[in-house]
Structure formats: C-alpha cells, structure tokens
Image (spheres, rainbow, N blue to C red):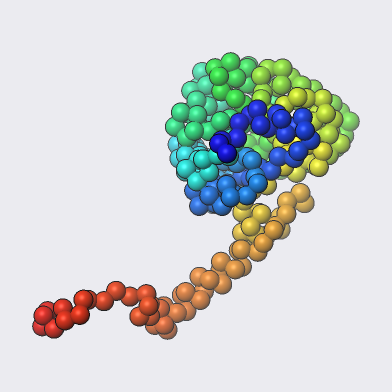
Amino acid sequence: NGRITISDLLQAKRDGRAIAAVSCYDYTTARQVSQTGAEMIIVGDSAAQLMFGFDSTLPATMDIMVALTAAVRRGAPNVYLVADMPFLSYQVAVGEAIRNAGRFLVEAAAQMVKIEVSGAHLDTIRAVSDAGIAVMAHIGIRPQRISTVGRLRAEGTTAEIAMQLIDLADQMVRAGAGALLIEGAASEVSQIITERTEVPVISCGSGAACDGQVLVAPDILGLTEGKLPKFSKAYDDLGPRSVESFRRYADEVKTRRFPDDEHSYHMKPGELQRLGA
Ligand code: KIV
Ligand code: NA
C-alpha cells in the first residue's frame, strides 16, 4: 500500500474520516500498531516518563528522541510518523530548531515534527516549515511548561482562553504549521478550531470533533499504573497480566520447573561418552 503521507491525512479530513494516532516509543509496539488501521504514530516525549521513569517530559533529549523515532520507523515503515521535539531543542535559537527538526527526517525517517507552542514560537514554526520540514503545532496543555505552571489543567474552558487558543491555532497555520495537536482543551473550542482550518487537527483529550485522536500506547494497553486522566481509555489490562507472567516465570525458576527438557539443548548422541565425563 505504501507509506501514508500528509496528502492522505488531508484527504481523510476532507472526507470526514477520523485519523487514529498512537504515541509509542519502541520497535515492538510500532510493529503491532502498524498491523492495525492506525494511520499515525507520534513518538512523544512522554517517553521520558513512560520509558525512562522521569516525573516530567523535560529530561527527554534529542539523542534519545531520535533513537526512539528511528526504532519506531523500523517497526512501522508505512505509518505517518511524527517526532516530538524535546525540551530545549527548539527554544534556544531558530537555527538550532531547524537543525534539530531536520535530524528527525534525516536520521529517523520521520515525516513531521511536533513542537509545543505559544505565540512566542511563530518565527520557529515559520522557519522550520520554510526549511522544508513539516511541523505540527501542539497547543492547549503543554507539558514542557510544567516548571512555570506547576500543574497541568484543562485548557479553553473560559471564553477568554478559548479565544486565545483559536487565535493561536490560526496564527500557527498561517505561519506554516501542517497540522495541529490540541491537548486537554474543551471540546467546543477544538471543534471551532477544527472547522476553521484546512490542516488535520489531532486531539489528545480534546473531544470528538477533531480530525483525529491520539492516546499513548501504554494507556491503550492498560500498562500505566494508577488512575488514567479523564480523557484516556484502557482497551486491555496488560499491566496486571504482565506482572502475572513475570511472577509465574520467577516461580518456575525458583522451583526448578523452568527450564524443562523442551527448553534445553543436548549434546549429540554418543558425544557425552566421548567426553569421558
Ligand atoms: O508526548 C506525547 O506522548 C504527546 C502526545 C500528545 C502525542 O505529546
Ligand atoms: Na509530548
């Protein structure tokens, strides 16, 4: 069938077909996602938390994100692949943003980069896009702002903030954003934004009216511990099931039931006698 491109996503939007996106970080999971109808994988910097155990997304680095994105691409050659630009990879200077964004295309075969934006990043979005790198503007809740906001809360629930979000979305698209991601915003606001723009709008907890939805793979599989955010949904309970598998394995080792003969190699007939042991 070939690799999904931005043209396919634009066509999906025009046809009113919802885009399914998954945030995942590794080859094995990407292979599984690629066997489904999901069109898009976003390699999110939430990997800092879910793969590396940090308490925020801030410690994700370019080298980590490039390595994870390349691994996901090897597992899912045909999905539309979006790479998350980590904290400090685009804030310091526009030139650095272009160079870092380009690494994802060159070293990991990503098709688009995602940047958490405010109005302060319009020049960055324009420059990256002008350099020939498709960019997704991430608005609404921006987890990389945790240091300044203290706690992440739903966005756009008042008319004032809603207006700012709608205006920001417009500005981003005019600056060259090829897609939008809205995180944790009121559904009504996301609907307005989705209807007024030509580019695909992906929702992360921002309601049903967007052109597509994204959830993180560990949530979908039920691997994340503790209560999920209101907008997320587990489609399995692999966490407890994995623990049970590891427990049975450990028990079998301790009771010497594993490995049994079926899982052991043996010398060729007669060779043990020749060894004289
Ligand atoms: O880091 C992440 O997983 C994200 C999702 C919203 C895609 O940014
Ligand atoms: Na992210």
Front-lying residue, 178 or 188: 178
Q: Residue at x 51, y 76 (%)?
A: 248
Q: Residue at x 72, y 42 (%)?
A: 213
Q: Is residue 104 above or below residue 222?
A: above
| Image quadrant in which you'd find residue 188 | top right
User: Where is residue 108 shown, x and y percent of the image?
Assistant: 47, 35
Q: Look at the image and tell me whether residue 201 can be seen.
A: no
Q: Is residue 250 above or below residue 99?
A: below
Q: Residue at x 84, y 26 (%)?
A: 163
Q: Is residue 272 above or below residue 198?
A: below
Front-lying residue, 7 or 153: 7
Front-lying residue, 100 or 268: 268
Q: In the rendered view of the protein, which quadrant contains the N terminus?
A: top right
Q: Is residue 255 left or right of residue 174?
A: left
User: Where is residue 112 shown, x and y percent of the image?
Assistant: 58, 30
| Image quadrant in which you'd find residue 242 | bottom right
Q: Residue at x 68, y 32 (%)?
A: 9
Q: In the rendered view of the protein, which quadrant contains the C terminus?
A: bottom left
User: Where is residue 257 shown, x and y percent of the image?
Assistant: 41, 82
User: Where is residue 206 shown, x and y percent of the image?
Assistant: 78, 40
Q: How many marks?
A: 0
